[in-house]
Image (tube, rainbow, N blue to C red):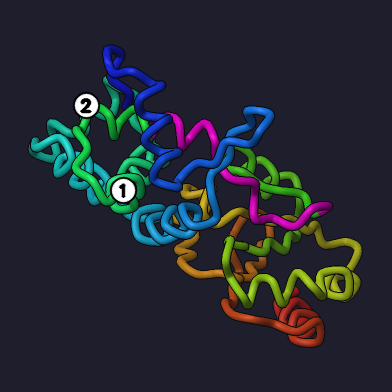
Amino acid sequence: MAAAHTDPETALDTLIEAGAVDESDSGELTVTDDFQKVLALYHDIYGAVSNEEFYSTVGDIFNMPPDEAEVEVDKRGITREDVIAYLAAKSFLDIPVEQELLSVMASIIVELEPASSVPEGLFELRDSTFESFLEVNDEVVVTVWKRFCEPCDAMKAELDEIQARIPSAVAVAGVDGEAADDFCRTFDITSAPTVACFRDGTLVEKQSGLMSPDEVEEFVARVF
């Protein structure tokens, strides 16, 4: 979404001054926790919308009809992550910012994508890999996680016990619900944590909300 003639340094400085991006003494750039919360909110709103709604949103940004917006999306390679970052930056900043500068900010934010919400040690599925993973594994349990999610954190604290309750023949993986928009849209997953069971590449059943190890064991046993 970036405009070539807009200065990236100005965009970055604006993000740092606004508290959306933090620069360490060593020069490392990271998205701040406060801004991550805003990003998470916009992922919830726009991450899993239909293509028609997505084109309508892009049309609102560029002041054009949805059909023209679809052409613009293809022409400029605009992604959902770009649009989410653009809208989050516009919401977070408390000063008027020109569209072109916001576009450059969005590009910077996408490059500084926060760390995945999937717990370390759990195989992570992405939009580019989930279809092949579901194809090669007969039975799969996938948990969808998000940042700043208290039920997710509670389940992560018991993750070892939860995984121990899942049969060894069942493949286990995790999905970042704020990054794998195609996955969430395909299986109509809008909240986290969500545990989804697949057989032969097809979603059999899913359940959202905090689940104890006993509840996960009972759920998986009922499905498989």
Quickly name the residue at label 1. Answer: 93
Out of 48 and 8, give the one closest to the viewer: 8
Residue at image position (58%, 61%) is 147
Q: Is residue 67 above or below residue 163?
A: above
Going by the numbered disc 1, the residue's amino acid type is Leu
Going by the numbered disc 2, the residue's amino acid type is Glu
Q: Using the numbered discs, state the Cα–Cα distance from disc 2 to disc 1 in whole angstroms.
A: 26 Å
Q: Indicate the position of residue 17 as horizontal and vertical percent values.
A: 41, 40
Q: Indicate the position of residue 30 as horizontal and vertical percent values.
A: 58, 40
Q: Secondary structure at mark 2?
A: helix
Corner quadrant of residue 2:
top left
Q: Indicate the position of residue 133 as horizontal and vertical percent values.
A: 70, 45
Q: Indicate the position of residue 176 as horizontal and vertical percent values.
A: 60, 53
Quadrant, the C terminus = bottom right
Is 202 situated left or right of 74 in this image? Answer: right
Range covered by the magenta-colored residues: 106-121
Q: Is residue 44 above or below residue 126?
A: below
Q: Is residue 111 magenta?
A: yes
Out of 146 and 138, give the one closest to the viewer: 146
Residue ranking furthest to the top: 5
Residue at image position (57%, 77%) is 208
Residue at image position (64%, 46%) is 115
Quickly name the residue at label 2. Answer: 72
Is 172 situated left or right of 90 in this image? Answer: right
